[in-house]
Image (cartoon, rainbow, N blue to C red):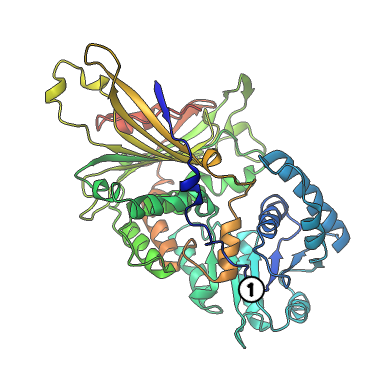
Amino acid sequence: MDGIVASASSEIQGAGAGTQPRPAPPCTFVVFGGGGDLTKRLLVPAIYNLACAGLLDDGFSIVAVDWAELSSDILRAQFHDALQEFVARRGTSATVLRDDIWQWLHTRVTYLRGSFEEAETYDWLAQRVGGGNAVFYLAVAARFFGPIVDNLGTSGLTEEADGAYRRVIVEKPFGHDLKSARELNTRLLGTLRERQIYRIDHYLGKETVQNIMALRFSNGFFEPLWNRQNIDHVQITAAETVGVEKRGRFYEGTGALRDMVPNHLMQLLAMTAMEAPVSFDADAVRDEKSKVLKAIHSLMPEDVVRGQYTAGALAGAPVRGYRDEPDVAPESRTETYVAMKLNIDNWRWAGVPFYLRTGKRLAVRKTEIAIHFRHAPYALFRDTPVERLTPNIMIMHIQPTEGVTMQFGAKIPGPTVRLGGVRMKFDYSEWFSEGPSTGYETLIYDCMTGDATLFQRADNIEAGWRAVQPVLDWCDRPEEAPLCSYAAGSAGPVEADALLARDGRHWLGLTA
């Protein structure tokens, strides 16, 4: 296919100069589970990037709380190794760890060995935090969310006085169904105010996800087309090549549906389908997202496909099936793939299906939102088979690359009228000189500055679970929620293709 690639101009790149964000206020960043993989692999690199960008105050410090036999010096060494690996693996223009930034960060790291459920841990934290600002990051198993917040409240660590803030970042999974999500919300709100709770979804930290609103609401040529008169359907894909690896025990009780749909995919859907907020105030944005999620029509069994990968091959190498993974039951009915057709009952989207799919051990790693526009009238091209006309598609790429592609038809040069497909592509890495990132930088900075726009509110969480709860109810009834199979390394079960084929549509190919 012929290609048209967008190129940057210094005038455009210079737009917005002078709008560099200010450093966040001084803060003690307390990480429960601070000795774990999430902290080393994502949180510390994100904090390092914020320090490189000059967005951390000199009063910033990290307290890592965990039960492991560590010391502050050992943990600092582990953080250093993790950062070196991060910049070497993820770096583009930045491939060497900045020693000045590391020395600044090194002196601000403290390790506290203690139980998440013992009062002594929180007594020590209260002395360490004092009366200043504090963020408490729960990088722990979900069963500890409630006890940690209860103890923070009992020890007085959630009390805000003299202008200081106290905020809690909660990782997913936020509940495992609608009932448990409601119960967790109730428990947290028994100690904290809603404005103190930051329910994190790392997908929302990605530039392209944030750019969805910028593309729609700051460009006059997108929003007039963003409706049922012009859009035929929307596809949202989150495909992974990895299997469950060493997380079999966790995944057996979770599955693809719980792991991805109520949070990640519902947030992508909401940002794609929401109405324009009256402002970029956090509650104004979240109000509109909530309206979309509440307008989702009840799912029917025929609109959902559940699949589980069997043995296959990836990159020419054989891989085993899900039931042969460690800690997975031989007769497991846990889905590793789910596809569904959703309808939104409002004026903008009535009659426009949203197709969602996510799965493990698929052909490629890719997360994207594809907006399929309606075909133009065919009068001018009566002698051209409809299937040969290039469909108009706008694809927002979220990972592994971030950018936007526009696909449309154009005349092929020559004496006769022949149509060919072309693409215009905007790639973040080509337009903007950004160093390596984890996707957590924006989210951590926003929490420290009190901007909750990219975090989920209680009603958003519950609306996402409400949309998928019927499927969870069917999972124990094989006749209503059958489990299909697909070979590892494929595009998923054929039943997912049939889900779109019955509507005369097809998935975009899962290719690199």
Using the image, determine if residue 481 lies above or below residue 79. above
Going by the image, does 334 lie left or right of 469?
Answer: right
As rendered, which of 98 and 363 lies closer to the eye? 98
Q: Position of residue 55 (x, y in %)?
A: 64, 63
Residue 260 visible somewhere in the drawing: no
Q: Which residue is mark 1?
A: 25
Residue sitting at 67 percent across and 54 percent down?
A: 49
As rendered, which of 205 and 465 lies closer to the eye? 205
Where the N terminus falls, by quadrant? top left
Q: Dot 1, how many residues are within 10 Å of its Cα: few (below 14), some (14-19), or many (20+)?
A: some
As rendered, which of 115 and 343 lies closer to the eye? 343
Q: Which residue occupies the extreme top position in the image?
A: 415
Residue 416 in which image quadrant? top left
Which element carries disc 1, helix, strand or loop?
loop
As rendered, which of 161 and 192 lies closer to the eye? 161
Residue 285 visible somewhere in the drawing: yes
Q: Position of residue 173 (x, y in %)?
A: 55, 56
